[in-house]
Image (cartoon, grey):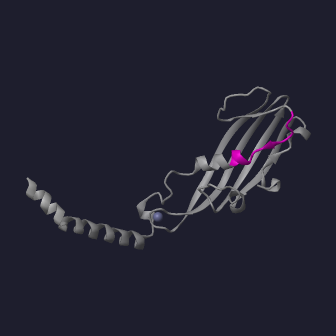
Amino acid sequence: MKKKDKFIIPFDSLKDGLHEYDFHANTEFFSNFDYTLIDNADIKANFSFEKKPGMFRLTLILDGVVNSICDRCLDDLQIVIEGEQEFIVKITEEVMDEYDHIITLSPNEQELDLTHVVYESIHLLMPIKIAHEEIEDCNPDVIAQLDEVNSSEEEEEEQDPRWDALKNIK
Ligand SMILES: [Zn+2]
C-alpha cells in the first residue's frame, strides 16, 4: 500500500490539544487489501485526535455506504455504515497485551497509522448477512422465480422412488 493511500496522523509535530482529521475510505482504499468483503464503498472517517503528554485519545466517526449485492435476490444493495468508536493511544516501551481500543506506539515513532483501524472498524459494522432486511424489499420477480424453483424441487422429492423404497421398509 502506498503511503499516500494510508491514513496517517503525524502526531509528533502537533501541539497538545484537539485536532480533527477527515479521511475517505472509498473503492480505491479497499482495493489495497487482498482480503476484504468490500469492493465498492464511500465512507467518511472523521478522527478527533486529542494530544496529551504521553497519551492520546482518538474518536472515530464513520459515516457512509457500502455498495454490494443482495445474497437473496442479487439486486444492488446499499449498506449504511454508521458508528463511533473511541481509542486510547499509549506511548510505551512495554509490550502490552492486545486490547481492543488500545493502540500502543513506541517512543521513537512519529506518526500514527490508522489505516487498519479504519479498515477493521468498517468491517465490524458490516452485517453478517448481506441481504435486504425483509424479503419484501427484495426484487419480487427474482423471489417469485426462487419460489417456483423451490416448489418444483419439493415435488420432485415427493416423487423420488427412493422415498417409496423407504416406505416399504416399514
Ligand atoms: Zn434482496
Q: Residue at x 18, y 62 (%)?
A: 162
Residue 126's place in the image compared with 75, above or below, is: above
Magenta stretch contains residue 109: yes
Q: In the rendered view of the protein, which quadrant contains the N terminus? A: bottom right
Task: Determine the residue positioned at 66% across, 43% down.
Answer: 84
Q: x, y percentage for residue 118?
A: 69, 48
What residue is rendered at 82% in x and 53% in y?
3
Residue drawn 65% across the image and 56% down it: 34
| Label tally | 0
Q: Quadrant of residue 134?
A: bottom left
Q: At which x and y percent is residue 103? A: 73, 35
Q: Is residue 112 magenta?
A: yes
User: Which residues are the magenta region?
Assistant: 108-118
Q: Is residue 31 left or right of residue 21?
A: left
Q: Image quadrant of residue 10?
A: top right
Q: Nearer the viewer, residue 47 or 104?
A: 104
Residue at the farthest top position: 94
Q: Position of residue 131 (x, y in %)?
A: 48, 59
